[in-house]
Amino acid sequence: MIGREKFRLLLLAAVVVLSGCATAPTSPTVPVLPGTGKNLDQFRADDAACQQYALTQVGGAARDRISASDTQRRYDLSYIQCMYAKGHRVPVLGPMAVQPARAPRAVPAPPPRTPPSSSGALLRYPPVNATRDLASDDVL
């Protein structure tokens, strides 16, 4: 009976010790598309190179006792940076909110015309009843 309890205790200790170790990611978890003008062979070569680069960037994760999710996040960010530097299309981190199109601002209507006052008529230039053109030496 004591042997069985020791075995369970040893098994529990092993699980606790091993759960603290981070494992190296095996692949990125983010989608990347070939860049403009890049063919599939170029994309595959860059993908392999960037996966290797990302793996070297998180190589010390097990030594630093970083969780597996943090290790994967670091791996993904390193991979994205590498693929972007090689000209491929990568996801944008952060909220993807689309601004709604704004309606054009309405132009205010002109103020209403005021009718002429009864005390005087509006002056018009040239006078409506004028029958001759003004000469250059006429004084107004």
Image: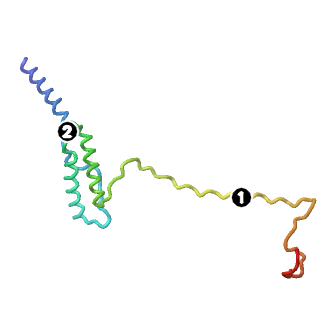
> Which disc is residue 1 wearing?
none
Residue at 36% in and 52% down: 92
- Residue wearing tag 1: 109
Question: Mark 1 and 2 residues: CB-CB less than 8 Å, in contact?
Answer: no
Using the rendered view, name the quadrant where residue 41 is placed.
Answer: bottom left
Residue at 51% in and 53% down: 100
SS type, badge 2 = loop
Residue at 18% in and 41% down: 23
Residue at 18% in and 39% down: 62
Of mark 1 and mark 2, the one earlier in the sequence is 2
Horizontal arrangement in the rendering, residue 71 relative to residue 115 (left or right): left
- Residue wearing tag 2: 22
**Where residue 59 sits: x, y (%)?**
19, 45
Colour option used = rainbow
Quadrant that contains the C terminus:
bottom right
Question: Looking at the image, is mark 1 or mark 2 nearer the viewer?
Answer: 2
Q: Callout 1, which amino acid?
A: Ala
From this view, report whether residue 118 is shown above or below residue 12. below
Q: Callout 2, which amino acid?
A: Ala
SS type, badge 1 = loop
Q: How many marks?
A: 2
| Front one among 75 and 14 | 75
Using the rendered view, name the quadrant where residue 40 is placed.
Answer: bottom left
**Where residue 114 sits: x, y (%)?**
83, 59
Quadrant that contains the N terminus:
top left
